[in-house]
Image (cartoon, rainbow, N blue to C red):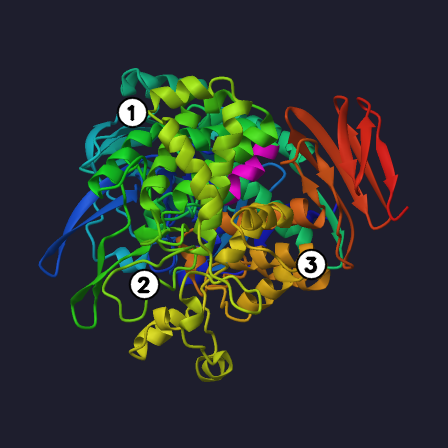
């Protein structure tokens, strides 16, 4: 076994954003909680940010800024319960005297092993730690701490639950109120700390059991409660080359998921766990993950296998069925690894639900359930804006109201500038898409029957009300933004938004087609539609709009990103790259020059081409032709070439979209290069320090989709599974398992043959031919015959 493919390792003491980013990548989690990989001896500084988050625990704060009150809702950084402080002969071991560091995150077992050396007057001191999260009893985490030196000394240890912490991960947020909770009670006798979020009123209980020993003898300690901390003090003599060992198990519970009194719940949790049990659970959980969900790729790129497993590891920490099925929470754009975007949920579920649906369907269901639970909030959002139906927010948190700011401050001249990002109304189309993916992949219609279809119909009401019929009979859709965040309005316009964004219009056409399909496919449709007041008049409008939405296209066959896009100025990308070097955020460069990205044909990320990430090219073509636009044979290549030349990949989610299109076009080498770059997004921190604020869950999901659904060519969205492999030349083989409607498919592909095994009999299409697989008998197909 190549151990490098099964771990993420760091070998240097790093600082600032680099250290913060490594701590995000070394984070542990289980869907319920996320534990950043900061050293246990560290506190918040420019170099370290220890943090603990629980999914769905948000709080709102108000900060006076330039004569306004700014309201922010944040994922809450909970009390630092890992803190172990050490003094050797009254000399602190901390970031000022640490001289070496080894960190190894094991994907196989979920353990984070770290070794640190500190230099003090008497010589070097070593601290070794192990950290674990329990994925089965998901309220529990644990750590071990081993202290050793080659000389005798007096040692003081403090095991702390520190309730004085605030949200400080993101530098640009630090001017805002960051006090998210108050300590309400410290029960020193039972080693418990209770806090309550200031606005949302969520109560959190944290309890810790700490044991210190030397030569298998327990060291007695004293417990002290201060205003904001629970501290256990230990003092003993350090013998040469004889380690002092500390074990700390930590239990976390909140009133979000627990109905019984929180003190009773915490006491039960603390009584039920120990470090060995946490390790046993973690090892068993990850062993099962790698047995069922590993993706093995033999390729020329020596790092590819490691990065694939890192991505799987983080997705299976961001959400998993054991925890998430019992939570009212989803996965934010940074997971539970940092406070970027304040922990909010955007449209990134679109990149995640397909993975979970094929690997952990109950987790996928839980993420969609989070949206169904917030339907009333989406309806209230629509009513507030004078819209119909359900308008899901671009940024969602605790309640489902819009958390994107209305305005933001220009710190140069202290003026307030509109923030139009909330006009990315396509988020609701992504939510409907997620439900469609889940239903197709799993065959489970119970979500549709229990709130899902009502949600879809309310989303459709919003769009059917928003479109307007023009004199030529076409339907126009104005006042929106597409996925490309560089374009918020037309040049010089006072009104925000654009008209007839191609991505939004085609996605809307898809949604309306699905609704029409469900009228006959879902027996409960009529009753659910009646209860949602989705009447015959609306059903007739569905048919009219799905055939009549307007797109703009030039003479070369390129569909405009939105109406009027071709009238924008061209940007000299070569000149800007020569002048500024990195132009992935050319929008900021243009604004600094007194210009606006609204004026130029430049894209942050794939916009209209996102359609080809969501659907195969045939379905996209069918939708466009249904709208009355005939397509030339090379239409996809023409559109890809046009927009790739104008895209700066300012979002990590951009390159995988183009990679998938390249696979479709047979440009496999180009696709492989784009994937290789994208899969390094966080490890190489390609956006200049943003990984410090948390990993990018969207691109993680995308890269796995490009591997399994594009290169390996597995399509689980059809009536039967389809496999059409297109492995790049730099890959020799790929092997993985996926679930299709409860059936496990075991797929091995090379350039010459494919083997598929299923645990139940089913029909499958391989390389264009239909076969019947017998339970447990591998189907082997030679390619090219």
Residue 6 seen in this snapshot: yes
The structure residue drawn at horizontal position 49% and vertical position 28%, both measured from the top left corner, is 365
In the rendered view, tell whether residue 573 sits above or below residue 481: below
Q: Residue 667: name its quadrant.
A: bottom right
Nearest to N terminus: mark 1 or mark 2: 1
Q: Which residues are magenta?
A: 351-358
* Near-viewer residue (471 or 783): 471
Q: Residues within 10 Å of mark 2 (few under 14, many from 20)?
A: many
Query: How many other residues sit within 10 Å of disc 3, few (<14), some (14-19) or many (≥20)?
Result: some
Residues 501 and 275: in front is 501
Q: What residue sits right under mark 1 in the picture?
A: 255
Q: Residue at x 33, y 54 (%)?
A: 478
Please say whether residue 356 is one of the residues in the magenta stretch.
yes
Work out whether 327 lies above or below 317: above
**Viewer-side label of 1, 2:** 2
Please tell me whether mark 1 sits on a helix, a strand or a loop. loop
168 or 200, nearer to the observer: 200
Provide residue 398's location: percent of width, then percent of height: 30, 36
Count the marks: how many? 3
In three-dimensional space, the C-alpha distance between marks 3 and 1, rounded to whole angstroms, equals 51 Å
Q: Badge 2 is on which residue?
A: 489
- Outermost residue toward the left? 67
**What's the mark number on residue 11?**
none
Up-down relation of residue 779 to residue 342 (above or below): above
**Most common SS among magenta residues:** helix
* Residue depicted at 69% across the width and 58% down the height: 665
Circle nearer the viewer, 3 or 1: 3
Residue 363 in percent (x, y) is at 51, 30
Q: Are marks 3 and 2 in contact (CB under 8 Å)?
A: no
Q: Which residue is mark 3?
A: 665
Q: Quadrant of residue 562?
A: bottom left
Q: How far is mark 3 from mark 2, CA to CA?
A: 32 Å
């Amino acid at each position: 076994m190549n151990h490098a493919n099964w771990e993420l390792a760091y070998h240097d003491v790093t600082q600032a954003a680099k250290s913060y980013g490594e701590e995000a990548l070394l984070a542990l989690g289980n869907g319920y909680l996320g534990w950043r990989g900061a050293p246990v001896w560290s506190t918040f500084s420019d170099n370290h940010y220890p943090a603990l988050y629980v999914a769905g625990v948000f709080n709102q704060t108000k900060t006076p800024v330039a004569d306004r009150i700014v309201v922010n809702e944040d994922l809450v950084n909970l009390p630092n319960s890992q803190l172990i402080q050490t003094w050797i002969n009254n000399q602190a071991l901390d970031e000022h005297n640490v001289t070496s560091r080894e960190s190894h995150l094991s994907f196989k077992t979920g353990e984070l092993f770290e070794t640190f050396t500190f230099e003090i007057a008497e010589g070097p001191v070593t601290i070794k730690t192990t950290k674990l999260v329990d994925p089965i009893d998901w309220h529990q985490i644990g750590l071990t701490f081993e202290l050793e030196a080659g000389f005798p000394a007096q040692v003081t240890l403090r095991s702390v639950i520190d309730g004085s912490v605030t949200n400080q991960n993101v530098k640009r947020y630090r001017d805002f109120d960051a006090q998210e909770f108050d300590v309400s009670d410290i029960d020193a006798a039972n080693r418990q700390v209770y806090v309550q979020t200031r606005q949302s009123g969520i109560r959190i209980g944290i309890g810790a059991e700490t044991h210190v020993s030397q030569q298998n003898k327990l060291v007695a300690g004293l417990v002290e409660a201060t205003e904001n901390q629970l501290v256990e003090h230990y003092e003993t003599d350090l013998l040469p080359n004889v380690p002092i060992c500390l074990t700390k198990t930590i239990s976390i519970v909140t009133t979000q998921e627990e109905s019984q009194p929180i003190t009773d719940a915490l006491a039960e949790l603390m009584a039920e766990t120990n470090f060995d049990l946490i390790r046993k659970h973690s090892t068993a959980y990850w062993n099962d993950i790698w047995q069922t969900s590993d993706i093995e790729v033999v390729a020329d790129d020596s790092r590819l296998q490691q990065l694939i497993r890192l991505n799987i590891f983080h997705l299976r920490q961001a959400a998993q069925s054991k925890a998430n099925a019992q939570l009212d929470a989803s996965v934010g754009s940074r997971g539970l690894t940092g406070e970027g975007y304040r922990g909010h949920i955007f449209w990134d579920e679109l990149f995640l639900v397909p993975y979970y649906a094929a690997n952990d369907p109950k987790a996928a269901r839980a993420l969609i359930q989070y949206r169904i639970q917030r339907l009333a909030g989406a309806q209230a959002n629509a009513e507030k804006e004078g819209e119909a139906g359900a308008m899901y927010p671009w940024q969602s948190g605790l309640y489902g109201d819009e958390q994107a700011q209305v305005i933001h401050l220009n710190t140069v001249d202290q003026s307030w500038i509109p923030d139009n990002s909330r006009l990315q109304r396509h988020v609701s189309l992504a939510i409907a898409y997620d439900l469609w993916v889940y239903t197709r992949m799993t065959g489970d219609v119970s979500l549709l029957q229990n709130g899902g279809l009502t949600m879809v119909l309310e989303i459709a009401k919003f769009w059917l009300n928003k479109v307007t019929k023009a004199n030529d009979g076409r339907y126009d859709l104005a006042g929106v933004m597409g996925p490309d965040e560089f374009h918020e309005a037309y040049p010089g316009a006072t009104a925000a938004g654009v008209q007839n964004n191609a991505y939004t219009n085609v996605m809307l056409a898809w949604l309306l087609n699905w609704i029409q399909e469900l009228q006959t496919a879902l027996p409960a449709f009529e009753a659910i539609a009646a209860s949602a007041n989705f009447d015959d008049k609306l059903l007739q409008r569905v048919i009219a709009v799905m055939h009549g939405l307007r797109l703009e296209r030039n003479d070369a066959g390129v569909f405009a990103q939105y109406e009027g896009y071709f009238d924008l100025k061209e940007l000299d990308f070569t000149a800007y790259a020569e002048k500024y070097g990195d132009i992935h955020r050319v929008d900021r460069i243009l604004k600094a020059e007194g210009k606006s990205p609204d004026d130029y044909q430049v894209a942050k990320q794939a916009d209209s081409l996102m359609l080809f990430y969501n659907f195969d090219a045939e379905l996209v073509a069918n939708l466009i032709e249904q709208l009355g636009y005939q397509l030339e044979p090379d239409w996809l290549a023409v559109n890809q070439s046009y927009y790739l030349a104008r895209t700066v990949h300012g979002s990590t989610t951009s390159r995988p979209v183009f990679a998938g299109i390249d696979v479709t076009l047979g440009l496999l080498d180009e696709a492989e290069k784009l994937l290789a770059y994208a899969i390094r997004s966080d490890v190489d921190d390609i956006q200049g320090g943003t990984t410090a604020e948390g990993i990018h869950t969207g691109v993680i999901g995308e890269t796995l989709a490009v591997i399994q659904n594009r290169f390996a060519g597995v399509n689980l969205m059809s009536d039967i599974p389809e496999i059409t492999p297109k492995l790049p030349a730099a890959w020799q083989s790929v092997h993985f398992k996926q679930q299709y409607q409860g059936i496990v498919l075991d797929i091995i592909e090379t350039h010459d043959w494919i083997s598929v095994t299923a645990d139940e009999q089913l029909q499958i299409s391989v390389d264009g031919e239909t076969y019947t697989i017998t339970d447990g008998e591998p189907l082997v197909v030679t390619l090219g015959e």
